[in-house]
Image (cartoon, grey):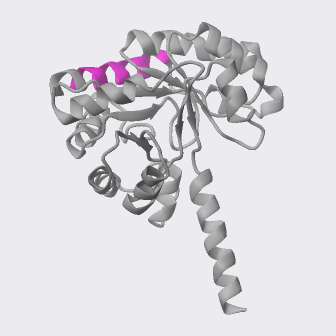
Amino acid sequence: MSVRQGKAALFASLHVAGAPLVLFNAWDAGSARAVAEAGAKAIATGSWSVAAANGFGDGERLPLALAIDNLRRMVAAVDLPVTVDLESGYGEAPDAVAATVTAALEAGAVGCNLEDSVPADGSLRTIADQAARLAAVSAVAERAGVALFVNARTDVFFQAPADAHDMAMVDAALERARAYADAGASGLFVPGVVSEDLIARLVEASPLPVNVMVMPATPPCARLAELGVARISHGPGPYLGAMQWLAQAARDAMA
């Protein structure tokens, strides 16, 4: 088994319901190294943070070549498995998304996030369209001989404010989860959901390990573990916290 195959296997094994993998998302080689030295088991990029750190907005405004080069430097900086947030795959057609994932694989990634919304307006793709894109990605990984952990992100819960979330939205997310699992996805990422009841139902019925993102109203990580979540992402939080500290330190220094 190659080193990368070993990292891929390790990364997949860390997704355990009730004992979740905690990802404190990094944005460059320096932050990846700092998170690794803090005891992380794996490193994850966050598209919002990577874009902001390079002067771009989120939504695939960061050039793909820059995103891949940043990924390559992060992989080189740490000995841990690295998963990359590829947003919507930087393309509409399955072949375009497959090409993006090929570049990420060549840069050393063992996992990726792929979302089912359109970057321009946040609207959801059809289930069939997203399943075809995920199937193309799975085929690329298989040809490369890497058990890529494809974290299929569904933006169902970003279509309405949290106080409007209900079990019908859970059912919609689960319908997508089943189709994405059949297409070869490895995990289900459901950012935006914060209700314990809805999270519990997702975990209970999802065919894939469930990933939740930390937000102001999200239950504490210990409670998410009790609910059976298998992966907890911190998204842009670490970058925002670092920049808040930097801004305050700069104000103090210049006072």
Quarter of the figure with residue 136: top left
Residue 147 seen in this snapshot: yes
* Residue drawn at x 63%, y 26% as measured from the top left: 156
* Image location of residue 69, percent across then percent down: 28, 56
* Image location of residue 16, percent across then percent down: 51, 20
Mark count = 0
For this orientation, the residue located farthest to the bottom is: 255
Q: Tell me if 79 is positioned left or right of 58 in this view.
A: left
Residue 148 seen in this snapshot: no
Residue 132 within the segment the image draws in magenta: yes
Using the image as rendered, state which of residue 135 and residue 242 is in the foreground.
242
Q: Is residue 211 above or below residue 65?
A: above
Q: Is residue 198 above or below residue 60?
A: above
Query: Can you say which quadrant of the picture contains the C terminus?
Result: bottom right
* Residue drawn at x 60%, y 20% as measured from the top left: 18
Dominant secondary structure of the magenta stretch?
helix
* Residue drawn at x 42%, y 54% as measured from the top left: 32
Q: Is residue 178 above or below residue 3?
A: above
Query: Can you say which quadrant of the picture contains the N terminus?
Result: top left
Magenta segment, which residues? Answer: 127-140
Residue 111 within the segment the image draws in magenta: no
Using the image as rendered, state which of residue 66 and residue 199 is in the foreground.
199
Using the image as rendered, state which of residue 68 and residue 230 is in the foreground.
230
Quarter of the figure with residue 231: top right
Quarter of the figure with residue 114: top left
Using the image as rendered, state which of residue 46 and residue 252 is in the foreground.
252
* Image location of residue 103, percent across then percent down: 24, 42
* Residue drawn at x 70%, y 16% as measured from the top left: 200
